[in-house]
């Protein structure tokens, strides 16, 4: 199957190119001293990712420490009520150690840091999930860990802050601007510029300057590889549609990468929040325009001055004003469709999945569930595989406080 003359057989060989571009998106736009640091990471990664020892070590860690492969579950009861004949399945990244897909790239990134002889890892976090995953990986490998986090998110995600501290990380509060993920990224970059000789920056998604979008995709590809094989074994065929939520875009690129060359429809779901007015959502691919921020070119939401716009989503892991460059590229190619779902339907899906299937999803993942339930009604037959990127324990107090029990 071909899409706009791009043959997905050779897609991973061609994208990104050696400068980190996916078409016009991606690249590395940084001050000179950080540019050198990125080149050091790129060249170390290019060598190490082909090393048999590195690959074997990562495979062992995934199995023995993370609990991979994570299963696929058929949502029998939810399909019966919501499916209109369509069968719904979830890839259970909520069962990955620490409760989300993010540990997949953190274990890879910190293993790389160890190979490079670094003493410290630096990261930023929104929902706290990347911070917890990075702190977990740092503890596993015995490296220091500094996590930058917006003051607003620190309040909203108290259990994850406690987790990071228990795991031995330093949590550094960021109070500038809206004090959420965007400001945390700025602060973490600033710290890294001072410490890059001894430290490595570990980005929490398929964004930032090259090589991070490529590296994080490669580490998340395990989700797609497992899911394709498991789904085939389970049903004898491929799903008609694969759905995943989009923040920076790592869990989605992970599962999509397994199906790019198949006749499977891929849909990325962005958070519409309270509605389509600027400031009320974080649907950057749907409503944004091309621009450079945080060291990479992609599609982003801009304010009147062309700066990254304020964004909002009920899921703090999705409230970022841009998405990874590869998503911008896949959108232009027409290979992946991007659509939106709002807070209200997300909260409904959060409760419905919990009640019908005994799975409490992360609010981020509940966006994908809500979208799949809506799509199932329109489709009438077929199957949808949802990437359940994480579990909802971290969101329970927030949901009950703001929405009550439904
Ligand atoms: C961080 C997070 C996301 C969003 O990040 P992506 O890079 O888009 O995957 C989604 N789900 C969960 C559970 C998260 O923690």
Image (tube, rainbow, N blue to C red):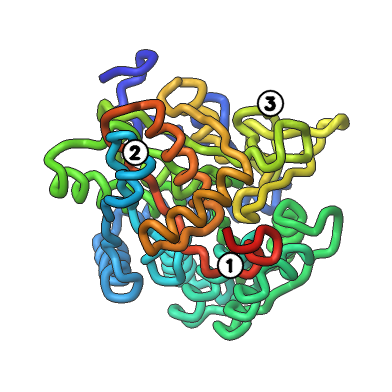
If you read the primary sequence from the N terminus, does the residue marked by circle 3 or circle 2 appear first? Answer: 2
Q: Residues within 10 Å of mark 2 (few under 14, many from 20)?
A: many
Q: Residues within 10 Å of mark 3 (few under 14, many from 20)?
A: some
Labels 3 and 1 touching (C-beta < 8 A): no
> Where on the picture, by quarter, is residue 26?
top right
**Quadrant that contains the C terminus:** bottom right
SS at mark 3 in the image: strand
- Image location (x, y in percent) of residue 197: 63, 67
Cα separation between marks 3 and 1: 34 Å
Element carrying mark 2: loop
The yes-or-no answer for disc 1 within 8 Å of ligand 1 is no
Which of the pair 355/270 is nearer the observer?
355
Q: Is residue 335 left or right of residue 87?
A: right
- Left or right? Give the position of 370 relative to 254: right
* CA separation in Å, label 2 and label 1: 26 Å
Residue 396 numbered mark, or none: 1
Residue 289's disc number? 3
Check disc 2 and report the residue beneath it: 83
Q: Is residue 189 left or right of residue 113?
A: right
Image coordinates of residue 25 in percent, x first then y, are: 57, 30
Q: Secondary structure at mark 1?
A: helix
């Amino acid at each position: 199957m071909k899409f706009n003359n791009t043959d997905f057989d050779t897609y991973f060989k061609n994208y990104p190119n050696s400068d980190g571009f996916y078409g016009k998106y991606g690249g590395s736009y940084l001050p000179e001293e950080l540019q050198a640091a990125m080149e050091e990471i790129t060249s170390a990664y290019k060598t190490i990712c082909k090393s048999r020892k590195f690959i074997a070590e990562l495979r062992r860690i995934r199995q023995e420490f993370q609990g991979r492969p994570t299963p696929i579950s058929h949502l029998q009861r939810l399909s019966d009520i919501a499916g209109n004949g369509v069968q719904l399945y979830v890839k259970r990244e909520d069962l990955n150690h620490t409760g989300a897909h993010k540990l997949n790239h953190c274990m890879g990134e910190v293993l790389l840091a160890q190979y490079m002889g670094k003493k410290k890892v630096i990261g930023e976090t929104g929902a706290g999930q990347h911070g917890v995953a990075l702190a977990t990986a740092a503890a596993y490998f015995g490296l220091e860990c500094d996590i930058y986090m917006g003051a607003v998110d620190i309040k909203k995600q108290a259990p994850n802050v406690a987790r990071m501290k228990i795991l031995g990380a330093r949590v550094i509060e960021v109070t500038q601007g809206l004090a959420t993920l965007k400001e945390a990224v700025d602060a973490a970059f600033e710290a890294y510029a001072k410490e890059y000789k001894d430290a490595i920056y570990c980005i929490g998604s398929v964004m930032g300057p090259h090589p991070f979008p490529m590296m994080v995709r490669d580490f998340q590809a395990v989700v797609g590889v497992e899911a394709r094989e498991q789904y085939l074994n389970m049903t004898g065929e491929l799903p008609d549609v694969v759905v995943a939520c989009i923040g920076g875009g790592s869990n989605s690129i992970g599962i999509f990468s397994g199906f790019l060359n198949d006749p499977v429809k891929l849909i990325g779901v962005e958070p519409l929040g309270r509605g389509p007015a600027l400031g009320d959502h974080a649907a950057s691919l749907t409503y944004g325009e091309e621009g450079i921020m945080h060291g990479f070119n992609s599609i982003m939401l801009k304010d009147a001055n062309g700066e990254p716009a304020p964004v909002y989503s009920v899921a703090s892991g999705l409230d970022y004003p841009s998405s990874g460059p590869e998503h911008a590229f896949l959108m232009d190619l027409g290979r992946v469709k991007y659509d939106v779902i709002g807070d209200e339907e997300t909260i409904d899906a959060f409760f419905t999945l919990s009640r019908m299937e005994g799975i409490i999803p992360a609010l981020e993942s509940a966006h994908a569930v809500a979208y799949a339930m809506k799509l199932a009604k329109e489709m009438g037959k077929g199957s949808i595989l949802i990437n359940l990127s994480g579990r909802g324990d971290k969101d329970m107090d927030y949901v009950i406080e703001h929405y009550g029990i439904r």
